[in-house]
Image (cartoon, coloured by chain):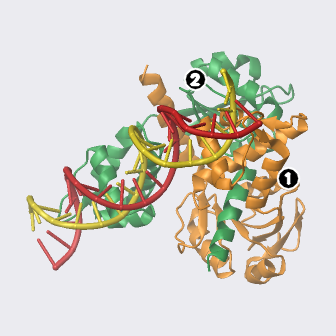
Chain colours: A orange, B green, C red, D yellow
Amino acid sequence: MKSVKIIERMLIYKDTLSKQIENGKKQIFSHELAESASSSSSLVRRDLMALGYSGNQKKGYNIEELKKKIDSLLSGKTINIALVGVGNLGKAILRYYSNLYPRYVISACFDIDKEKIGQFIFHSKCYNLDDLKNIVSEKDISVGIITVPAESAQQIADKLIEAGIKGIINFAPIRIKTPKDVFVEHIDFSNVVEKVFYFSKLSKSNK
Amino acid sequence: MKSVKIIERMLIYKDTLSKQIENGKKQIFSHELAESASSSSSLVRRDLMALGYSGNQKKGYNIEELKKKIDSLLSGKTINIALVGVGNLGKAILRYYSNLYPRYVISACFDIDKEKIGQFIFHSKCYNLDDLKNIVSEKDISVGIITVPAESAQQIADKLIEAGIKGIINFAPIRIKTPKDVFVEHIDFSNVVEKVFYFSKLSKSNK
DNA sequence: AGATGTGAAATTCTTCACAGCG
DNA sequence: CGCTGTGAAGAATTTCACATCT
């Protein structure tokens, strides 16, 4: 399963299924999943076909089973994350997302500020950037978050990659260059704002 | 220009062009723009064709002119934003992004907490949620940011839409339902982490 | 020679439409 | 009957390849 879009939808389906489990619902139809993901019922069926999960023509899909199937695609292991750059944004992420979900944990954070190194910042211990490689293998970290200023983002990306990390979430307002086997998600707030603004205007003008 | 992908690339081109202007560069080739956006030179040429901008076969594209052309597509006006939910995440966004870029401004924020209402929080005045509609039209706000807990996100979205907003950035970990003419960008940190993790593993296993 | 601009092909993604099951 | 599973059609996106310009 190599398409980003299908994985994004799987994650949405998973959220919907979790919610339905809480509600005590047992079965769900493709058109219901479609609504939650703002897609179409046939696309949902295609996606589940790709997953290798079959439903029942009378009752739809079994919610528990389907969720298990998606979970197994995504692998249930805890995701260990390293966050580099404990400035305002980094701290906000540490504060907001530490311990919010059991599925992943920001196992370590890194900075060059001597004041911060050695401290615990919202449950994550702060290490010296020079120790990145060691800590990454020691703690089995597989995802890196970049929250340093634009000027140093590329160099941090290089260090993460050298430490063996293949997945990066980059909040710095600059595109980082990486080898093709590294997956990067750029979250550039400024560009998101412009994009949303652009399409909001389109709606207004297109009557 | 109705495709999200092409607009996303335009924003990347724009960033690259701005940087090159700072460097004093005058002309740029399609393959250089392609590298910065991790796309291909032919895709860049297609995009610029769609923009209606022509280059020169000897010297490539004029950076200033091309940037102006992209700016005019995106419309140069200041983007006024309303942020709803001044909790940890909301505050972090206010702190981090207020005054970072001249292109947009978080003109007002909203909460239901009496303590916060009337205060200035990192340059944004906090209003009572009940005043949303008035403030939105008074301040010509076109983009809404949702940073409330999942439970209230849908109801906030409804209020934003009722106030006439057609573009929403939703940080709450839930999919909000909106009419088709409202553009929503969901930034669900948890799902981003899972997605990045998934593709990082793919790289590791695919030799 | 080395770039752009662009039909045409290729690929990827989504919807259509309907057979067949329960 | 209404829903799933799916071949086939249709759209959207990207790449190919090459004529053309300078």
Is residue A86 visible to us here?
A: yes
Residue located at (72% from left, 58% from top) = B193
Q: Are marks 1 and 2 on the same chain?
A: no
The residue at which mark 2 appears reads as B139
Q: Taking A86 as reference, is B177 above or below it?
A: above
Q: Is residue A178 left or right of residue B116?
A: left
The residue at which mark 1 appears reads as A101
Amino acid under label 1?
Answer: Tyr
Disc 1 chain ID:
A
Specify the label residue B197 is tagged with.
Answer: none
Disc 2 chain ID:
B
Q: Taking B111 as reference, is A189 above or below it?
A: below
Residue A139 occupies which quadrant of the picture?
bottom right
Q: Position of residue A97 (x, y in %)?
A: 81, 53
Q: Position of residue A160 (x, y in %)?
A: 67, 75
Residue A118 occupies which quadrant of the picture?
bottom right
